[in-house]
Each structure stands twice: as C-alpha cells, then as structure tokens.
Image (cartoon, grey):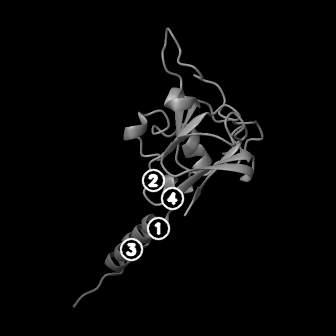
Amino acid sequence: MKYSIKANFAVAAAAAAAATLVMAPSAHAEEPTQYRNHFSEEVCKDPGYSGFKFTLWFNSDFKGSYRNIGYNVYDFSDEHYGGTPAKQPLSYCWFGASSPWPGSGQGIKNNAASAANRHATYMADVYYNSGYKGAVDDVAWTRNLNYTKNNNASFAWRV
C-alpha cells in the first residue's frame, strides 16, 4: 500500500475540523435564560400555545395583557442579560393597537393579579420580594394571586 503525506495530512485536517465543529458550543447554549425571557417568540404567544409554561396576567381572572415566562426571574424590574448595567424590566405584551388591553407594555413587577401554570412537573412560585423571598403564591394550575397580588417581584419553578 502506498500512503502519501498529502493524503494523511488532508485526513488529519478534516478530522480536526470535524472535532472542532462537534466541540464548539452552539449560540443557543450560550444564550442566558434572562435573554430568552425577554426576547423569545414564546413570550407573547397565546398561553395555550406557548412553549413557556407560566403566564402572569395584569388583571384578576386572567384578563388584560399577559406575559409568558419560561425561566426563573430573580427580579421582574431588573433582569440582567448581556453584561449591560442598565435596568431591564420584564413587561406585559402589547395587545390591541387602537384600544390597548389593560396593562399593555407596563412592567410586571407589582402589577400581576392572576397566573397560570401549565407545567406537568413543576410548581410555579410567585414571590413578594426580589430574590425569591417573602410571601409566596404557589401556582399549581390557575389562580388569582392572593399574597402577591400587585406586590410581586420574582418567580421560580419548584419541584
């Protein structure tokens, strides 16, 4: 058998390139959850069709504007992503161009009255204070908020 140095080098180079592609992380894997809570196409979809399994509504009884949330939120008024020091609050989706729904575009912090959890495994907890502290409303399915109605500052999934 004849082996050429060029052929061996080409095979080695191709193997190295393939290994680099396999080992390189995808952009999605590096994307912080805070970024996805802000900019995913899931946040304003109809709650029944969103991949995000938790929803907060501006008004009681699941009325007014809403926002779907997929990941824990340490502070609704300041969810940092991308290394910027500017405050980045989560806000309700804007619905009703000529006649906006109640809460459209307003910040979620201290502005939620009802919630729904569509996750089959996790309990959803809405906290009075930032950092998952203070009074809590646990949301197993759907409910009007009690302890945290219009005094909600963070959210976390719980097994």
Dot placed on the residue nearer the N-terminal end, 1 or 3? 3
- Image height of 100 relative to 113, above or below: above
| Residue 15: mark | 3
CA gap between label 4 and label 1 equals: 37 Å
Which callout, 4 or 1, points to the residue nearer the camera?
A: 4
Q: Residue placed at 41% from the left, 33% from the top?
A: 46
CA gap between label 3 and label 4 equals: 43 Å
Which callout, 2 or 1, points to the residue nearer the camera?
A: 2
- Residue 50 horizontal/vertical position (percent): 41, 41
Dot placed on the residue nearer the N-terminal end, 3 or 4? 3
Crowd tier of the residue under label 1, counting other residues whose Cα lies within 10 Å: few below 14, some 14–19, many 20 or above: few
CA gap between label 4 and label 2 equals: 6 Å
| Residue 20: mark | 1
Crowd tier of the residue under label 3, counting other residues whose Cα lies within 10 Å: few below 14, some 14–19, many 20 or above: few
Residue identified by numbered label 2: 119
CA gap between label 3 and label 2 equals: 42 Å
Q: Are marks 4 and 1 in contact (CB under 8 Å)?
A: no
Q: Residue placed at 53% from the left, 23% from the top?
A: 94
Which callout, 3 or 4, points to the residue nearer the camera?
A: 4
Q: Nearer the viewer, residue 24 or 46?
A: 46
Q: What kind of residue is marked 4?
A: Tyr
Q: What kind of residue is marked 2?
A: His
Q: What kind of residue is marked 1?
A: Thr
- Residue 49 horizontal/vertical position (percent): 37, 39
Dot placed on the residue nearer the N-terminal end, 2 or 1? 1
Crowd tier of the residue under label 2, counting other residues whose Cα lies within 10 Å: few below 14, some 14–19, many 20 or above: some
The quadrant the C terminus occupies is bottom right
Q: Are marks 4 and 2 in contact (CB under 8 Å)?
A: yes
